[in-house]
Structures are given as structure tokens and as C-alpha cells.
Image (cartoon, rainbow, N blue to C red):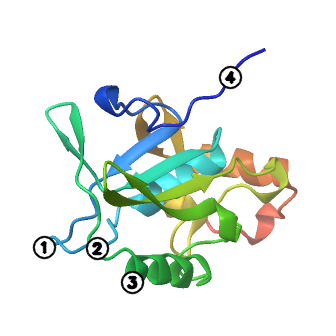
Amino acid sequence: MTTLTFALDDIDHLQESAQVEFKLAGGRDGTGQLPEDMWETYSAFANTLGGEIILGVREEKGEFTIEGIINPMPMLSEIWEILNDTTKVSHNILAPTDVQIIEIASKKLIRLHIPAVDKRLRPIYIGKDPFSGSYFRVGDADMRASHEQVKQMRQRSGIDLSLAKPS
């Protein structure tokens, strides 16, 4: 039997991987702000194996520390607003239980569980154009999908490519 471990099970040895991404989400004043590049990770996880985005963790020279988010509620509202705006994200694939405020070491973090989506729904992309807003995960990095990779995802999903414009 295999056991699944959660990204924060061992806080002394935090690390990113193909299915874990940490973001500080501190904002300019330190009270919390959604990182813009979080949505690239959302797309990448959805189009690959799925994963966890943890907001409130600082990375410095490959070391991760839990900083927390002072007031996470406005960020939760913003996450749902963006997820439900098809001009910003092609599909909201998250259930209410996939976005949580968690507390570790007396600090509040936001955890997003991003499932891998069925091939028929791919690509999940940010913005209005799948050819410029689709990502996939390679190791611990989000990579922009090439025009050809997006075409392949769309063909697998059954989308009529005659309607797609090249970029």
C-alpha cells in the first residue's frame, strides 16, 4: 500500500516538485496579494498531473519558509472571482473543498488542490487565447505550451480546429 504525503507534512524539508508549488503571496505591503504567476501554475497542473499550490511560503535560494498570510479572506474571494471569469481562466475546475485556509505553525496559508483534468477539457488556459495561455508542468517549472502542443491537446479534446486561429 502506498501512502500519499501532503506538501506540508515535513515543514523542515519543504520543496517544490512536479505536483507542488509554493508562492509567497505577500504583496507590496506584506498583507497578502495573489501572485500573478499563480495562474500559470493552475493551467500547468490542470494540463499535466494536477498538484497543490500553497500560498504563504517564501522561497529564498532554494530554501522555503512558512510566512503565512495575515488576512487570507480577501484573497479567497479574488481566487473565486478569477476562476469564474472566463476571460481570465478558461474553466473553473475547482470545487469549494479544493480551496482551503490552513494553519501551520500558527500561520495561515491558502491551499489550492488542482486536479488533472480529463483530456476532453484540455487545454485549461489563462486569458482568452489557448495558444498563448496554456501551460504544462515539467519538474518544478511551468512551461508555456507551444502552438503544436496546444493543437494536440485540442485535437484530443475533440475541439474543431478549423475555428482556431494560429498565433
Establish if 136 lies above or below 95: above
Looking at the image, is mark 1 or mark 3 earlier in the sequence?
1
Look at mark 3 in the image and give the residue it sits on: 74
Q: Nearer the viewer, residue 50 or 156?
A: 50
Nearer-N-terminus badge (2/4)? 4
Q: Nearer the viewer, mark 4 or mark 1?
A: 4
Task: From the top left corner, tell me how far across and down residue 132 is, in percent.
Answer: 49, 61
Residue 1 placement, left or right of 99: right
Closer mark to the observer between disc 1 and disc 3: 3
Left or right of 117 on screen, residue 150: left
- What's the CA distance linking mark 3 and mark 4? 34 Å
Disc 1: which residue: 28
Q: Amino acid at mark 2?
A: Gln
Image mark for residue 33: 2
Identify the residue position indicated by label 4 in the image.
Answer: 3
Q: Nearer the viewer, mark 2 or mark 3?
A: 3
Identify the element where label 4 is drawn.
Answer: loop
Q: Which of 102 and 57 lies nearest the eye of the viewer?
A: 102
Q: Comparing marks 3 and 4, which lies closer to the viewer? A: 4
Which residue is at a point 72% across and 48% down the rendered structure image? Answer: 153
CA–CA distance between discs 4 and 1? 39 Å
Which residue is depicted at the point 64% across and 61% down?
Answer: 98
Q: Amino acid at mark 1?
A: Arg
